[in-house]
Amino acid sequence: MADMAAPALEVSQVTMDFGGLRAVERVDLVVRPRETVALIGPNGAGKTTLFNCITGIYSPTQGRIQLTAADGRVMALKGLKPNQVTECGIARTFQNIRLFQNMTVLENVMIGRHCRLRSGIFSAILRTSAMRREEAQVVKESYRLLQRFGLARHVNEFAKNLPYGAQRRLEIARAMATEPSVLLLDEPAAGMNAQETQELVTMINQLKASEGLAILLIEHDMRLVMQLSDRIYVMDYGKLIARGTPQEISRDPAVIKAYLGEEEQ
Ligand SMILES: Nc1ncnc2c1ncn2[C@@H]1O[C@H](COP(=O)(O)OP(=O)(O)OP(=O)(O)O)[C@@H](O)[C@H]1O
Ligand SMILES: [Mg+2]
């Protein structure tokens, strides 16, 4: 069972201060292989800041972040740079879409693939002859990934010309191209209409079937959270105020209070 598995991602007592502001305070959180876990909470609760601590954008003021690879290797992530965190096996998407807007859909995914190659992105740009064969392989794999995400027909379009929902899907495809063991999604349904959200749910359900993947998802769309999550953590003012199954969370008094408080503002 998922409960018995060792955590893929383990966040222990993580605190993040910005000057006098404590944006994240002593947060503990685990995500196990094959689990989908949601991180919810009112605006400004510290959710994105926690993602930024996990992915090396910030180095937490205190605490420990640990990744256990499928082969059992344990890696301490604190202090690593974002690209090193990606190499360890954590991929993410951003609250505001961050694609290479003037590159094609295929190129956006290929960039993701390159982190798994010995030659790296610079060889790809320089196009040394020895790299061409590897490049052909990357194109093939990237195309296969785009097919999986329903983006194959857009393969040669510029990212900026895709419909909004497709851009969000492309961001996830690019993240998956790095072959992560942990995928972090920051508000993947933000700005989506009902149909796009439903397509996203289908896509994340397919991802859940991926070999051992652990998904941690920040989301304000409660229907999506309830549909997709095995477990939920709730943050408010930087602290965890609740954790549990979707059922437990939906009737937790502290959670209801945090959300009602938000509406009163
Ligand atoms: N780089 C920074 N410098 C200073 N303060 C920051 C920085 N990043 C975030 N904060 C502050 O930390 C707090 C938590 O912000 P964060 O973006 O993590 O919230 P969030 O839970 O993701 O909210 P939302 O749901 O609106 O995205 C906020 O008060 C925010 O203003
Ligand atoms: Mg946020």
Image (cartoon, grey):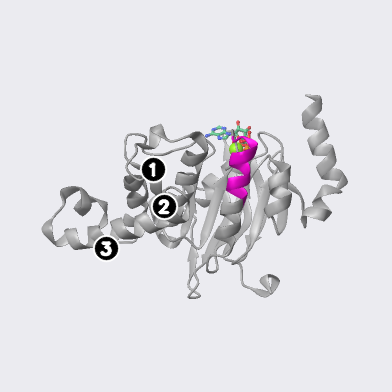
Q: Is 116 in front, or is 20?
A: 116
Q: Earlier in the sequence, mark 3 or mark 2?
A: 3
Q: Which amino acid lies under the numbered mark 1 shown in the image of this protein? A: His
Q: Earlier in the sequence, mark 1 or mark 3?
A: 3
Helix, strand or loop for disc 3: loop
Residue name at image x 40 percent, y 59 percent: 87
Pointers 2 and 1 in contact (C-beta within 8 Å): yes
Q: The N terminus appears in which quarter of the rendering?
A: bottom right
Q: Is residue 105 left or right of residue 41?
A: left
Task: Specify the segment rendered in magenta.
Answer: 192-201
Helix, strand or loop for disc 1: helix
Q: Residue furthest front?
A: 153
Q: Which numbered tag is attached to residue 118?
A: 3
Q: Residue furthest top?
A: 265
Q: Is residue 54 left or right of residue 265?
A: left
Q: Which numbered tag is attached to residue 154?
A: 1
Q: Earlier in the sequence, mark 2 or mark 1?
A: 2
Q: Is mark 2 within 8 Å of ligand 2?
A: no
Could you tell me if residue 183 is visible in this image? yes
Q: Is 139 in front, or is 236?
A: 139
For label 3, the crowd category at 10 Å Cα-Cα, with few meaning under 14, some 14 to 19 and many 20 or more, is few
Q: Residue furthest left?
A: 129
Q: Which amino acid lies under the numbered mark 2 shown in the image of this protein? A: Leu
How far apart marks 1 and 3 lie (CA) works out to 28 Å
